[in-house]
Image (cartoon, grey):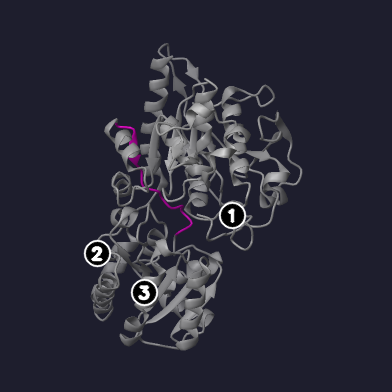
């Protein structure tokens, strides 16, 4: 999750939110919308390291049409630079080994209220949300994110100066998952929903840290937060939350298996058997429209795909690729083992023999970065690599490429394959997680069954055959561009989860 750090500092241009519809009680009297505190360690308006940042920027804005949704995010340097004079609306005392902090507040231009967890010693740093500029995790990540979780629990308990108290907490991944535990240990019940964006990142720390974190010793057991001798923040969220969601229906099934359950498959099977584990596919925002995207060299639409040529030419120029009649393959990814980047590297010789070219952007593991740079030097004009990430470049790559290579070994949801399809680039992907749920094999992309070189090359051959038939290629492009990945659909499913958790709490009360 921390391998690719994208610091944008931008506020999204969203349409003004619709008014929250009135809710009526049995007597027909207006009542206020239910209040949701969405707790996240990333938001793409300011800082993101992966898909969580995009989700945190989009989902609360969609849910805001029905709920009073507010976000709690750490006071990272990029947040403070964008809002240097935040009014303080709450103060939290030190607890155990966790420092005192303050809660700031601002409102985005489209009306979303964001609470900022102010603790400069913990968050006002260069680097990503999780590590330094060299990619090393911060040594005090347990303190940093336990403090975030405790702040969420304290807001849930009611802060006098805040003037607002949530009816439900929506937690995201291990950095905020401990909030569910703090509510249970302090015997202050509140409905909680935990979304797992990637089970592989669990927030594991030494048990000697329990006193500093304010975790009771009796919670350190197999039915609690103990995980192979360590404290697991994510397991705390799974154990103590009312409902667990993850970001695709296929991944929800996969994480209940030993192969992809990361040691938590037994606990997750129990949640699934109880009806308390759901897969809800992520969406993408409305800016992913090739007719209007300002980053593109030329706009285009399904009925007129000529604009893809201008974008392909621009990508070739940016990546130093030669003029070619062959297909252009793109890799837009964190450069890590999970993403199957090594498989893409191994498939390069085959792609080049078939007349293709490859453009790669991303950052991640040093060894993979070095291998890609060597590949570009060995094949000048055919392989181009830009380490790092720049959004405009990425969008032009989706728009200009013919195919997106995405041979992930596992993929909870994935967003790149959705972006690519909306821009007429056909993904070549392993049939797993959200890739299986969002790509129609042979219609909007190409899926293969096992994360192996042979399977990937087989899918590449199928893609090249489609490229050589312009009629088939354009038919697939139009089908891909016609796919709908709207957040509204996801919001309907989250509403069902929220309503169930809130009704359960009402019955328990």
Report the magenta stretch's main SS: loop
x and y, in percent, of residue 194 in the image: 44, 37
Regarding residue 439, the answer to whether it shows in the image is yes
Decide: is 383 above or below 459.
Answer: below
On residue 402, the disc is: 3
Residues under labels 1 and 2: Cα distance? 41 Å
Q: Is residue 170 left or right of residue 483?
A: right
Picture residue at 54% right of the left edge, 64% below the top:
391
Residues under labels 3 and 2: Cα distance? 14 Å
Residue lying furthest right in this view?
A: 85
Question: Residue under circle 1?
Answer: 137
Q: Which residues are magenta?
A: 275-288
Which of disc 3 and disc 1 is earlier in sequence?
1
Residues under labels 1 and 3: Cα distance? 36 Å
x and y, in percent, of residue 307 in the image: 42, 74
Which quarter of the image is occupied by the C terminus? top left
Decide: is 506 above or below 150.
Answer: above
């Amino acid at each position: 999750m921390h391998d690719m750090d994208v610091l944008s500092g931008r506020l999204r241009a969203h349409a003004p939110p619709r008014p929250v519809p009135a809710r009526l009680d049995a007597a027909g009297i207006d009542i206020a919308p239910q209040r949701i505190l969405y707790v996240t360690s990333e938001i793409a308006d300011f800082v993101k390291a992966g898909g969580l940042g995009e989700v945190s920027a989009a989902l609360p804005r969609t849910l805001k049409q029905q709920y009073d949704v507010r976000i709690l995010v750490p006071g990272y340097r990029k947040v403070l630079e964008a809002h240097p004079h935040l009014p303080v609306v709450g103060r939290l005392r030190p607890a155990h080994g966790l420092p005192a902090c303050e809660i700031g507040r601002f409102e985005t231009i489209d009306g979303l209220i964001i609470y900022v967890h102010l603790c400069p010693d913990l968050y006002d740093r260069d680097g990503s949300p999780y590590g330094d500029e060299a990619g090393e995790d911060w040594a005090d990540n347990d303190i940093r994110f336990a403090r975030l979780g405790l702040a969420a629990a304290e807001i849930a308990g009611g802060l006098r100066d805040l003037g607002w108290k949530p009816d439900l907490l929506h937690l995201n991944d291990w950095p905020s998952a401990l909030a569910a535990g703090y509510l249970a240990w302090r015997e202050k019940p509140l409905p909680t929903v935990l979304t797992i964006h990637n089970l592989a990142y669990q927030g594991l720390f030494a048990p000697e840290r329990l006193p500093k974190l304010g975790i009771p010793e009796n919670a350190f057991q197999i039915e609690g937060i103990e995980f192979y001798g360590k404290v697991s923040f994510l397991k705390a969220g799974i154990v103590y939350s009312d409902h667990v969601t993850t970001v695709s229906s296929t991944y929800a099934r996969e994480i209940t298996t030993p192969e992809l359950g990361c040691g938590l498959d037994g606990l997750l099977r129990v949640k699934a058997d109880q009806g308390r584990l759901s897969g809800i596919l992520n969406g993408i925002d409305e800016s992913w429209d090739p007719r209007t995207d300002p980053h593109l060299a030329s706009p285009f639409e399904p009925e007129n795909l000529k604009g893809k040529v201008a974008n392909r030419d621009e990508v070739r120029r940016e990546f130093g690729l030669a003029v070619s009649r062959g297909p252009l393959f793109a890799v837009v990814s964190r450069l890590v083992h999970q993403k199957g980047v090594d498989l893409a590297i191994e498939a390069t010789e085959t792609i080049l023999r078939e007349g293709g070219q490859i453009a790669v952007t991303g950052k991640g593991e040093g060894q993979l970065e070095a291998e890609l740079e060597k590949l570009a030097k060995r094949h000048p004009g055919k392989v181009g690599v830009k380490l790092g990430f720049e959004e405009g470049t990425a969008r032009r790559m989706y728009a200009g490429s013919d195919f997106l290579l995405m041979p992930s070994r596992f993929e909870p949801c994935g967003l790149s394959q959705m972006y690519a399809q909306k821009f007429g680039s056909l993904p070549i992907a392993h049939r797993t997680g959200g890739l299986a749920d969002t790509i129609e094999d042979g219609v909007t992309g190409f899926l293969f069954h096992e994360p192996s070189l042979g399977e990937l090359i087989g899918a590449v051959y199928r893609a090249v055959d489609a490229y050589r038939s312009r009629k088939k290629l354009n038919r697939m492009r139009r089908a891909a561009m016609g796919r709908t990945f709207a957040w509204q659909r996801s919001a309907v499913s989250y509403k069902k989860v929220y309503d169930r958790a809130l009704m359960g709490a009402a019955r328990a009360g």
